[in-house]
Image (cartoon, rainbow, N blue to C red):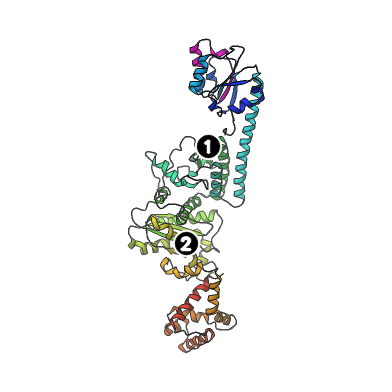
Amino acid sequence: MPEPGTITVARALELPALRRGLPEILTAPGELQRPVRWVHAGETPRIASLLKGGELLLTTGIGLGSRAAEQRAYVRTLAERGIAALVVELGSRFTALPAAVVDTARSLGLPLVQLHREVPFVAVTEEIHTELVNAHYALLRQADEVHRQCAEVRLRGGGVPEILRLFARFADNPVFLETADGRLLYAAGPTGRAGLADPLQIWDGLRARRPGTTQDAAHTLEMPQPPAGSVLVEVPGGGPGPGAVRARLVVLPAAGPLAPVHRIAAERTATLLALVLLQARQEEELAARGRGDFLTDLAEERIAAADAPAQARVLGFRPGDGPLLPVVMALPTATAPLGGGDHWAALAAALREELASVGVPALLGVRLPEARVPLLVGLRGADERVPVAERVAGALRAGVERAWPERAPALGQRGARSGPPVVVVGLVDGWEAVGAELRHAASAASAARGLPDRPWHDVRGLEVDLLLWRLREHGDLAAFVHRMIGPLLEHDQTAKPPLLPTLMAYLAHAGRKAETARALHVNRQTLYDRLARITRLLGTDLDEPRTVLALSLALQARRHLP
């Protein structure tokens, strides 16, 4: 396939003007797929000094010279200049090309073509230039199509990650967005590309090959100099001086070479990225979303445990040799802004600052679709789990209140429609098991929504809730709840006082009637009367252990039903 915006030597020889000259290929027939970027006609012996490479050179041979040494030097300088092919018209100077010319072209792999009939070089030039213009126009149309698709993504509410993922699919290569000082903001790779390493691995591999790589204040590794053939485009920031560059878009030829169309498309995409970043000031959110994607990929086993530490280091997480503590904060969907923009950027910044005061290594991400904040915390030992969990949970909740002060009352009130954020702390472990524990903690956080507020939940205390939550759409669960407490629920719809709170308090206090009466602020006789009514309605014995267990499960299951 020719490079976009060019034609091949073979295609040029197929055009009518050259076909009329009866072209004969003398050397390098395997090189006819070379790209032709321009056509030049000339007879000077030093024609090579006028060329830039990639030209199809037309000549009658006058500049070849009469001696074999001159002819060899003429061909050699053209090959060194990198022309696409040499086309010599016979008749004016030669009836057959000298052996020195043919042998030198063959030894250098330069396509050499002789024309047996005279052709007007101007006609050849016009035809090939028309082909080149058409090819370049097709190139621009491809770039326009990519830009149009990126703009549509933006109009549909997508942000920088969606745009970068679309561009990575187009380029079929990994794409990176880095800050002006080299800090990685987001990495995207072409989906479904077999044999291609994860973009973070590619980034880390490049960094490892660069001597003297340093770290910035946030402990984030700088991007090494991209290899040859990469596309690097500056994303403008709209201001003079250092502020003129807001970020850089880097496309690496990891899966295949990049063509001119990729640079053209990258330049247009960079303009769109500049508008997105300027409009939403997304850098903080973007970095947090990139870390959130990594943690989600780790939880969903899309990243191997052996590769995870290196990729985490790229994102600035260096926990040492101790165990890892997975933590997930679920934000109430009625409160969290599920779009992008300043709300999420403010949240990411506030959470990062609050966690910095905890004094432990932490990798914090955000997941917009699930309104969730996953993170990994590095511990020195397993015995630190509880004290560190308390500090981390406090920092997370403080960060939410800082970022969304207008929502702080709703976030802090029990029983409010939106409710407070839910923080679930998993079990400490190493990289081999931390992905599964992150996934488990995320599910447990969803199951814990609606539970009585507490600073943080130990994942071990949510196993029953998690089991019931996973069965929430199964018809048998609703039928179980109806069988166990249905008559009580129907009673409370019309009668007062409701009896369900009495049953809940009674079970919560393990059947201790004195404590239950105090919790309900009623005397014992009132409690006895209510318990008797509950017994009659349900037809059960509240002192029977299996009945108590079934009622407790029904009350927990009721909270998870649609």
From this view, report whether residue 352 is shown above or below residue 216.
below
Find the magenta span and give its range: 55-76
Q: Quadrant of residue 3?
A: top right
Q: In x, y percent, where is residue 165?
A: 54, 47
* Magenta stretch: includes residue 105: no
Amino acid on which disc 1 is placed:
Leu
Image point 55% across, 58% down: which residue? 338
Say what secondary structure mark 1 lies in: loop
Q: Quadrant of residue 377?
A: bottom left
Q: Give the label on residue 442, or none.
A: 2
From this view, report whether residue 51 is shown above or below residue 235.
above
From this view, report whether residue 488 is shown above or below residue 328.
below
Q: Which residue is mark 1?
A: 258
Q: Quadrant of residue 433?
A: bottom left
Viewer-proximal residue among 195 and 515: 195
Whether residue 458 appears in this view of the structure is no
Check whether the beta carbons of the residues at disc 1 and disc 2 lie within 8 A of each other.
no
Q: In x, y percent, where is residue 488?
A: 55, 81
The quadrant of the picture occupied by the C terminus is bottom right
How many residues crowd mark 2 within 10 Å: few (<14), some (14–19), many (20+)? Answer: many
How many residues crowd mark 1 within 10 Å: few (<14), some (14–19), many (20+)? Answer: some
Q: In x, y percent, where is residue 167?
A: 55, 44
Viewer-proximal residue among 372 and 276: 372
Say what secondary structure mark 2 lies in: helix
